[in-house]
Image (spheres, rainbow, N blue to C red):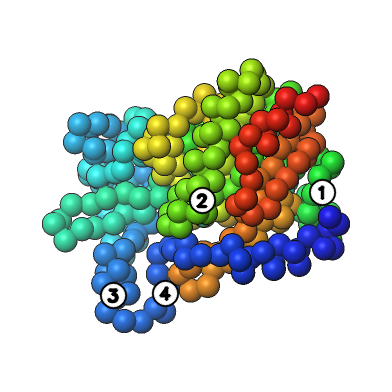
Amino acid sequence: MTANTAVPIALAGLALLVAACGRAPAPGDSGAAAAAKAAEAERHPLTGEILRVEAERKVLIVRHDEIKGYMPAMTMEFLVSDGDLALARPGQRIRADLIPSKDGDFRLERIWPDDRTIEARSIATGALQLRQDTHTRGKNAYREVGEGAPDFTLYDQEGRVVQGSRFRGRRIMMNFIFTRCPVPTMCPAATAKMITVQRLAREAGVADLELVSITLDPAHDTPGVLREYASVRGIDTANFSFLTGPEGAIRDLLTQFGVITQFQGDILQHTLATLLIDPQGRIAHRTDGSQWEPQDFVRRMKSP
Ligand SMILES: [Cu+2]
């Protein structure tokens, strides 16, 4: 497949593969349901420092900066999800969305390391390099089988900074998913098959495998959300990482890996690609669409 044919084929596939992968309503949605959702999704961007983690109450005590036009700087407690709770450390600086509830308590969602942290700066540098690389490659941005895979710097489900080059010397099985995908035959099925690959590879004695799932929906899929996605599925993350990062970096990766996403209203439509990257960092194999067999990938891992 050449770069020129790849996109039309993938686009044609889009019509077949798409399904109602939902996301939050876009501004401009009309109707009572949308209005109700908008009210419950009142969000205020917050930055601050985690002072304490109260795991039993699922609460973070955060000293936050002034929220212009809403709240002065103060220390208060926030409810957070299990995934965010597990990642929270006293002393961490974060940015997040503050969401007030009707009962008078406050939640934090979309929690990321604050932009000023060392982690966030290395993520931003990685995104910039990827941007330049995609730009330089121009029409040849799409990476063929046999070419090197692009390098990247993203967060994993533990909030650790992960560089693609860290996996050099190991074999990567990579796909793209998003946690809110409600269509059983799309992302949930893909994750289930990745889990099967992990098990079959282990049984077959493949010792150098890393499974990597990159989110298609970085606005929602924070490290904490990905951690929860892995944990509710009982996934062994010893060699299975879920990665996220800045929207620009994800967009460039999708361009280079030939995965197409498109929002139609509040529906995220996307194609599916599953890749095998060899220990030298070259794309050894890819399949498009949902019809791939775990056993086939494991067989390819065993061949030299
Ligand atoms: Cu999906």
Distance Cα–Cα, label 4 vs label 2:
26 Å
Q: What label sits on residue 187 in the rendered view?
A: 2
Q: CA distance from mark 4 to mark 1?
A: 38 Å
| Front position among marks 3 and 2 | 2
Please give the residue where the numbered disc 1 appears in the rendered image: 144
Mark 4 or 2: the one toward you: 2
| Disc 1 within 8 angstroms of ligand 1 (CB) | no
Quick one: label 4 or label 1, which is nearer the N terminus? 4
The residue carrying mark 4 is 27
Q: Are marks 4 and 3 in contact (CB under 8 Å)?
A: no
Report which quarter residue 209 is drawn in.
Answer: top right
Identity of the residue drawn at 29% across and 43% down: 80
Q: Secondary structure at mark 4?
A: loop
The amino acid type of the residue labelled 3 equals Ala
Q: Which mark is residue 33?
A: 3
Q: Callout 1: helix, strand or loop?
A: loop
